[in-house]
Amino acid sequence: MNYLPLLAAVPLCILSSFGALAQGTLLKQWASGVVTRSSEYGADTWGAKQVLGEPNTMTYGDNGTAWASATRNGLTQSITVSFTEPVYASAVLVRETFGNGFVTKIFAVDTKGGLHQVWAGKDKTQPGYTVNFIATFPKTSYLVKAVKVVIDPNHDQAAYEEIDAIQLHGTK
Ligand SMILES: [Ca+2]
């Protein structure tokens, strides 16, 4: 019996494991730019730019430090935000701060501008608290530079559906 192939295979396995670690480090980025939005309640407070950067809305409720659409209820709304480092994406975090439970779809935007739906479903986030809703999906085979979050403004008829921050999870 020849043991040589087995012995030779061991160092290769170790090497490839280390390689995977180096390339597979999960990067978590807060949104850095607004690409577009369906509407916004204001240009400054409640404006689309309020989703950029780290969270700064710490209490549940109608806060001008989060994005709100122009009307409390009505047509489907969306916001598209970009990130500094394109990544192979595996999750999107949406920080919900009012009217929680409203995310219906998430699209990834590849580096050529192509739109890919990566998540659709029931957002079970409960109202009353600021909550990080995290949508996970199989890692994309393409680099993602932006995401489009689609929301249902009619989820809470008594509230605006507000987003404080959006974070993209992925590997370089
Ligand atoms: Ca509403």
Image (cartoon, rainbow, N blue to C red):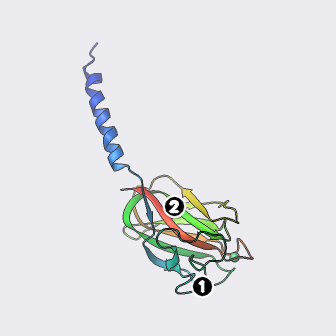
Which residue does the image show at 57% across and 77% down from the upper left? 67
Q: Position of residue 172 (x, y in %)?
A: 35, 56
Tell me the CA gap for discs 1 and 2: 24 Å
Residue at the outermost bottom position: 43
Instruction: Provide the secondary structure element on which disc 1 rests.
Output: loop
Q: Which quarter of the figure has residue 12?
A: top left
Nearest the viewer among 13 and 109 is 13
Q: Position of residue 153 (x, y in %)?
A: 66, 75
> What's the residue type where badge 2 is placed?
Val
Left or right, 82 with respect to 66, comes to left
Instruction: Provide the secondary structure element on which disc 2 rests.
Output: strand
Q: Position of residue 36 (x, y in %)?
A: 48, 79
Residue at the outermost right position: 158
Which residue does the image show at 65% across and 68% down from the upper left? 102
Nearest the viewer among 42 and 136 is 42
Left or right, 9 with respect to 57, comes to left
Marker disc for residue 64:
none
Q: Position of residue 105 (x, y in %)?
A: 58, 65
Find disc 1 in the rendering and name its residue: 41
Could you tell me which quadrant the N terminus lies in? top left
For ligand 1, the image quadrant comes to bottom right
Which residue does the image show at 54% across and 65% down from the upper left? 106
Tell which circle, 1 or 2, labels the residue nearer the N-terminal end.
1
> What's the residue type where badge 1 is placed?
Tyr
Disc 1, ligand 1: is the CB inside 8 Å? no
Find disc 2 in the rendering and name its residue: 92
Is the residue marked by circle 1 packed among few (<14), some (14-19), or many (20+) residues within 10 Å?
Answer: some
Is the residue marked by circle 2 packed among few (<14), some (14-19), or many (20+) residues within 10 Å?
Answer: many
Nearest the viewer among 131 and 77 is 131
Relative to 86, does residue 62 appear above or below in the rendering? Answer: below
Left or right, 90 with respect to 73, comes to left
